[in-house]
Amino acid sequence: MILLFTDFGLDGPYVGQMKAVLHRDAPGVPVIDLFADAPAFDVRRSAYLLAAYTVEFPPPAVVLAVVDPGVGGDRLPLVVEADGRHFVGPDNGLLDLVWRRATERRVGAIDWRPERLSASFHGRDLFAPVAARLASGATVPLAPVGALSAAARDWPDDLPEIVYVDRYGNAMTGLRAEAVPPGATLEVAGRRLARRRTFSDAAEGEAFWYENANGLVEVSVNRGRADRDLGLVVGARLAVALP
């Protein structure tokens, strides 16, 4: 399968154009919309979502990941192989957490260009054809690269910030729940929140945090909206309070 992870949104032609290339070059390969609304232009926060939400897909899944505000610049186009999955995207930090957390990993710079490569839509013209080739079992010319660029190396292993708000108002963070000590509470927006296993363990209207289905700390309000009720936005910081 090919998984799409972008900040393009589903309005407008961009995701549709990439899918058309994928269907043309890899007919019969399922194409899955994973995220079309990753934080816009926000490579850093998107990197934590990408790492958390792709780890469960079985190899040899191909992830076409494009959050690329520097498109047309001097960043390299990459193929990263991480624990059997292929990630196709820019070397701007987006793939850094995937790379860092992988046990087995390789990386190469894409050493192929189409006849027509626009300056502003490498997702369609470069990354999508490469992802389609990989998903079809074809080889892609790659130039040796020792590692990803150092642009994101000072990013923490876990990010205690809101990185995404879903349609229910639940606020996902870049912090893995396994990194939070047992019995700890979280402080966010001037509130101290207890941990709950799931929504039904919280009273109606209660704000809490829990480990979401992909292992991330998520702030929620049972039958409410954490973004509205707590005033949370992408970028809001959290603090871990030890018992």
Image (cartoon, rainbow, N blue to C red):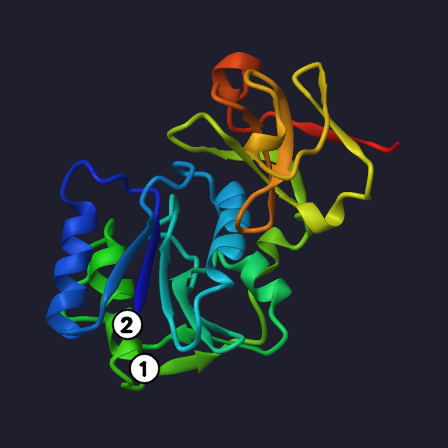
* Percent coordinates x, y for residue 47 in the rendering: 52, 50
Q: Residue furthest right?
A: 243
Quick one: SS at disc 1? loop
Task: Give left or right: position of 142 versus 105.
Answer: left
Front-lying residue, 101 or 188: 188
Q: Residues within 10 Å of mark 1 (few under 14, many from 20)?
A: some
Q: Which residue is mark 1?
A: 140
Q: Secondary structure at mark 2?
A: helix
Q: Are marks 1 and 2 in contact (CB under 8 Å)?
A: yes
From what the image shows, is residue 243 above or below residue 176?
A: above
Q: Residue at x 48, y 18 (%)?
A: 224
Q: Position of residue 241 (x, y in %)?
A: 82, 30
Question: Which part of the image, by quadrant, shows the C terminus?
Answer: top right
User: At which x and y percent is residue 198?
Assistant: 59, 37
* Residue 44, label in figure: none
Query: Label 1 vs label 2: CA separation?
Result: 7 Å
- Check the image and report above or below for 106 versus 212: below
Decide: few, some or many residues near mark 2? Use Cα within 10 Å; few <14, some 14-19, many ≥20. many
Asked if residue 188 shows in the view, the reply is: yes
Residue at horizontal 55%, vertical 48%? Answer: 48
User: Which comes before the other along the chain, label 1 or label 2?
Assistant: 2
Label 2 is placed on what type of residue? Val
Q: Is residue 2 left or right of residue 58?
A: left
Tag 2 residue: 130
Dividing the picture into quadrants, the one containing residue 126 is: bottom left
Foreground: 16 or 75?
A: 16
| Residue 101 x %, y % | 63, 64
